[in-house]
Amino acid sequence: MEHSDVILVKCKNCGTINRIPSNKMHLRARCGKCKAPLELADFSGGMPVKVTDANFEMEVLQSPVPVILDCWAPWCGPCRMVSPIVDEIAREMAGSLKVGKLNVDENPIIASRFQIMSIPTLLVFKGGKLADQIVGAMPKAQILQRLRPHIPYS
């Protein structure tokens, strides 16, 4: 089974990272360690998740997989160019990477916390820590090159 065929889900009961085959996502999964039901709805499954000041800790810092956070604004032309690339990366790397989108106009606390001065900015988090920051619009190949050191199986 390839890495893209597996979804990583963290058990909210014991914290164990569980590997769920993507073709079994419709079934009721249980944690392999403590047998608690897994909440698969919490995993984005290849779709970017909306990140806000309120859910940043849970969606980004507590993620069992690395996170790329697209910091953007609706009025930003380069952001609109990068957005479809980020969406593609979310689909292609589901299970190895979680993708979030943070509207900096609506979420000034996180934008300020990470000193977002230019957009688009992609923040890469691994193990709850900021691992890289990619500022400005760039082609998909360059974004992937910057992500590779932070993503398992890449």
Image: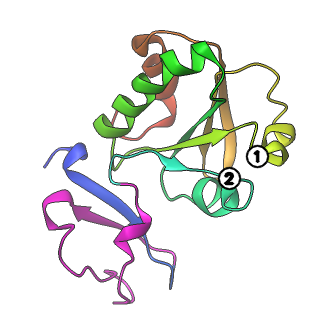
Please, which colouring scheme is shown?
Answer: rainbow
- Is residue 90 shown left or right of residue 49? left
Percent coordinates x, y for residue 135 in the rendering: 67, 17
Which residue is disc 2 drawn over? 52
Q: Given the image, on which type of amino acid does mark 2 rest?
A: Thr
Q: Residues within 10 Å of mark 2 (few under 14, many from 20)?
A: many
| Residue visible at 58% across and 21% down in the picture | 79
| Residue visible at 13% across and 49% down in the picture | 1
Percent coordinates x, y for residue 78 in the rendering: 58, 13
- Is residue 10 shown left or right of residue 27? right
Percent coordinates x, y for residue 87 in the rendering: 39, 33
Circles 2 and 1: CB distance less than 8 Å?
yes
Say which element carries label 1: loop
For the residues labelled 2 and 1, the Cα–Cα distance comes to 6 Å
- Is residue 23 shown left or right of residue 51? left
Q: Given the image, on which type of amino acid does mark 1 rest?
A: Asn
Which residue is disc 1 drawn over? 107
| 57 relative to 131, above or below | below
Question: Which residue range is magenta in the image?
Answer: 15-44
| Residue visible at 74% across and 54% down in the picture | 53
